[in-house]
């Protein structure tokens, strides 16, 4: 079956292919599809394309599907950087009918970064206020797709920390941790712009109790895709504002637990941090 590039949108695509001829009861949710010759890896965003509105279940979580041009439906499936390589069962459910497929995940290695923090910042922990507010904002699933591919860089500056890095802080290894985004080294006051259109889901400040993240901004890009910007010096938008691609939204700072001025930009799909580099590259995923 041909897949039109107009809605493939460049994310690492893994549309599930039937492992065996479909049974009568699951024909409606397992019609002929394709899988690209590359396997997703930890940090990837998988697009599951089906011919009907269905729920995709993976690793004990459910993911909704949204309509695409041409009558197809897409669910975005995030793969955590902590996910191990292997074949994982994936279920596509419609009206109580379940089709199970295997999702092969390739291996990926991440580096180790050693950071030194000043005594006054090393002990900073997230307050209940910021934990609850950020969790709520990153859980937003609005039906409209505001984003388009590729995403743009949110700030000018070199990448000082890549996605997925494990870390030590002052010599202590952070267990079950991975760097959930990209860090851009940039002078304090450098403009931060929206990498895609979105709606402001959260504006949080140090004065409001955001001790770990510092001044924090979250954008809702629609259909479970959100992005977070932390350690900001100043936020230039308000909650509820709709922003355009490239619009100036904040200034780089070093608030919260930061070793110096920089922007931490994280991209989340259904509350799981995925690799923003995939969204920046906007690779063409298929041929018509």
Image (tube, grey):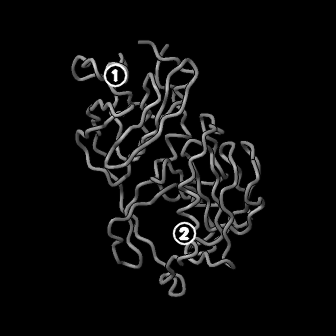
* Residue 246 point in image, percent of width and height: 73, 44
Residue 37 falls in which quadrant of the image?
A: top left
Q: Are marks 1 and 2 in contact (CB under 8 Å)?
A: no
Q: Which mark is residue 220?
A: none
Q: Is residue 208 above or below residue 221?
A: below
Q: Residue at x 75, y 43 (%)?
A: 244
In terms of sequence position, does the residue under pointer 1 or pointer 2 come before the other?
1
Q: Quadrant of the N terminus?
A: top left
* Residue 136 point in image, percent of width and height: 56, 61
Q: Which residue is mark 1?
A: 30
* Residue 56 point in image, percent of width and height: 39, 37
Pick whichever, 44 or 109, lies toward us.
44
Pick whichever, 161 or 242, lies toward us.
242
Q: Which residue is mark 2?
A: 132
Pick whichever, 184 or 249, lies toward us.
249
Q: Secondary structure at mark 1?
A: loop
Q: Is residue 274 left or right of residue 88?
A: right
* Residue 127 point in image, percent of width and height: 54, 78
Q: Is residue 246 left or right of residue 131?
A: right
Q: Is residue 44 above or below residue 49?
A: below
């Amino acid at each position: 079956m041909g897949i039109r590039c107009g809605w493939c949108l460049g994310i690492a695509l893994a549309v599930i292919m039937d492992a065996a001829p479909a049974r009568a009861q699951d024909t409606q949710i397992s019609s002929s599809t394709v899988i690209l010759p590359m396997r997703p890896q930890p940090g990837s965003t998988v697009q599951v394309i089906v011919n009907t509105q269905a729920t995709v279940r993976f690793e004990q979580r459910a993911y909704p599907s949204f309509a695409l041009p041409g009558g197809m439906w897409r669910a975005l499936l995030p793969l955590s950087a902590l996910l191990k390589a292997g074949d994982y069962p994936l279920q596509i459910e419609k009206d109580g009918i379940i089709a199970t497929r295997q999702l092969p995940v390739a291996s990926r290695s991440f580096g180790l970064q050693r950071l030194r923090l000043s005594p006054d910042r090393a002990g900073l922990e997230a307050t209940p206020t910021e934990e609850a507010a950020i969790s709520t904002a990153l859980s937003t699933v609005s039906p409209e797709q505001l984003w388009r591919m590729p995403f743009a860089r949110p700030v000018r500056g070199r990448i000082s920390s890549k996605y997925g890095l494990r870390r030590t802080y002052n010599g202590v290894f952070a267990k079950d941790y991975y760097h959930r985004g990209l860090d851009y080294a940039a002078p304090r006051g450098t403009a931060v712009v929206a990498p895609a259109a979105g709606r402001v889901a959260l504006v949080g400040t140090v004065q409001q109790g955001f001790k770990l993240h510092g001044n924090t901004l979250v954008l809702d890009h629609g259909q479970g895709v959100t992005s977070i910007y932390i350690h900001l010096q100043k936020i230039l938008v308000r909650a509820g504002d709709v922003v355009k691609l490239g619009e100036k939204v904040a200034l780089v700072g070093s608030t919260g637990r930061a070793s110096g001025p920089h922007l931490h930009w994280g991209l989340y799909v259904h509350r799981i941090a995925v690799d923003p580099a995939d969204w920046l590259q906007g690779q063409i995923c298929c041929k018509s």
